[in-house]
Image (cartoon, grey):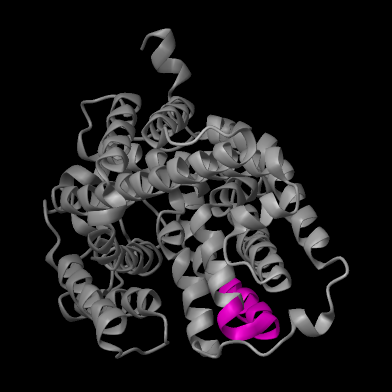
Amino acid sequence: MNKFDELVEDYSKKPVPDTRTVSGIRVALVIIGISIALPAFVAGIQIGSAVGLTHAIIAFFAGGLILTILGVLTSVVGARARLTTYMLVQFSFGPQGARLVNFILAATMFGWFGVNASLFGKATATTMEAIYGYGGLEDLYVAIGGALMVVTTIFGFRALDKLSLFAVPVLLAILVGIMALSVTGTDPATLFATARGDMTLGLAISATAGGMMAGVVTMPDLARYLAGKAQAVIAMVLAFALGGPTILLTAAVPSLATGQSDLLLILLSLGFGVPALFLLIFATWTSNAANVYSSGLSLAATFPGVHRWKLTVAAGAAGTLLAIAGIMDHFVPFLVGLGVTIPPVAGIYVAHFYFVAHQRYDLAILSTLPPVRWRAFVGWAAGVAVGCLGAYGGVTLTTIPALDSLLVSGALYLFLQGLFPHRWPGDKRGDPLSS
C-alpha cells in the first residue's frame, strides 16, 4: 500500500481497529453536521407552519425519540461488528445478493447528492446576487461545491470528523442567533398563532422521523468508529433526541416569527448576508459529503478490487453531473421511490445480527454462506410493499411508512428463519434461529 492509499484508508472492507475508535460525542457532531441541511430547513418550516409551534415542538422531539431508539439498534450493530452497512448486509443477504442491495443504496445516495448539489447551486446564485449583485452561474457553483465535497470525502471518516468539529459549532451558533434575533420584539401570540391545520400531529411526527430514516439505516458507516454500546447510545441521544429537534426548531421559529417560508430570505432580511452564505456552503458540504461517503463505501463493497477513494470520486462526479443535468426536474420522484426500499434493509440486518448471528460476525464465514439468502429478499420485498402502501396508498401501521417497512421486513425475516431453520456458521448454541 503506497502512502496515498494509507492516507485515504477507511477500512471499507474490514473491521475498524480499536486504535481508530472515537467518542460518541465526535460521531454525534458528524451526524448533526449531516442533519444541518437545506431539506431539513424546508421540513422544519413546513411542519411548523402546518401544525403550529406547540405541536411542532412535540412532533420534533417525538420524531427524534423514534430516531434515537432505531439509531441505537443500528449503531450498536456497527459498533460491535466494526463494519460498514454494505459489508453487514452480505451476512444477511448473501455475498452476491448484497450486490443488488448495495447498488440500490449507492444509487440513492449519489442521487440525493445530486439533489442537494442542485439546491446548493440555486441558493448560492440567489445569495450572491442579493449580496454582491452577481447572478446566474448555478452550474459553476454546483461543480465547485461538488468538487469540494468529493475532495473532502476521499479521506474518509477522519475528514468528516474534522469538518464537523469545525463547522457544526459555528453552524449551530448561526442558527440559534437567527432564531433569537427573529423572535426579538415578536408578540408571543404571533409565534403560537393557530396553524393552517393541513397536517395532523401524527403526520408531523411521521414526517420528522421519516426525513432521517435513511441516515439511521446506514448508521453503521459512522458507528463502526465507536468504542462500544455506551458510546453508541451517547451519540444517538445527542444527535437525534437533542440535535435533530433543535435544528428543525431553528428553521420553524424564524419562519413563524417573520411569516416568511424561505430561510434564505429570512437570513437576508435580518442582515445575515455573509453568515447566510457560510451557512449555505457548510450546511450543504457536511450533509452532501456524507452522501458521497456512503455511496463510496457501498460501491467499495460491491467492487472489492477497486480502491474506495476512486469509487468515491466516481460517485461524486456522477452526482454532480446529475445536478447539472437537472435532476431536480426529472429524477426526484424516482429517488423518493428508491427511498422506500432502504428501511427494510435495516430491519433485516438488525434482526439477523441480534437474533441470528447473536451479535458475532466474522468475515471469514462469508465464503461459506450461500451466494443469495432468499429469506432476506422475501422480507425485503414484503417491507417494500408495506412501505409503498403507506407512502402511496394511505394504509399504515404506525403512520410512518419507513418504520412500517422496517418492522415488517425484520419480523418476516425472523419468521422465515424459524420456519426454515439452519445453523449459522460458527454458532455453537444450537438455537433454531441460528441460520
Q: For the point 84% across and 79% down, which residue is it?
A: 187
Q: Residue 136 at what x, y percent from top left?
A: 43, 36
Report the quarter where the N terminus lies. Answer: top left
Tell me where residue 381 appears, x and y as whole percent: 17, 72
In the picture, measured across the screen, residue 12 lies left or right of residue 26, that is left
Quarter occupied by residue 321: top left
In the picture shown, does residue 167 fall above or below 268? above
Relative placement, left or right, of 326 versus 248 is: left
Is residue 251 magenta-colored?
A: no
349, 249: nearer the viewer: 249
Residue furthest to the right:
185
Front residue of 390/123: it is: 123
Residue furthest front as drawn:
133
Residue at image position (30%, 64%) is 336
- Range shown magenta: 49-66
Q: Measured from the top left, where is residue 270 in percent x and y?
A: 75, 53
Residue drawn at 15 percent across, 61 percent down: 373
Residue drawn 41% across the image and 27% down it? 147
User: Dividing the image into 4 quarters, which one contains the C terminus?
Assistant: bottom left
Q: Nearer the viewer, residue 251 or 89?
A: 251
Magenta: main secondary structure: helix
Residue 87 in sight here = no
Where residue 130 sits: x, y (%)? 60, 42
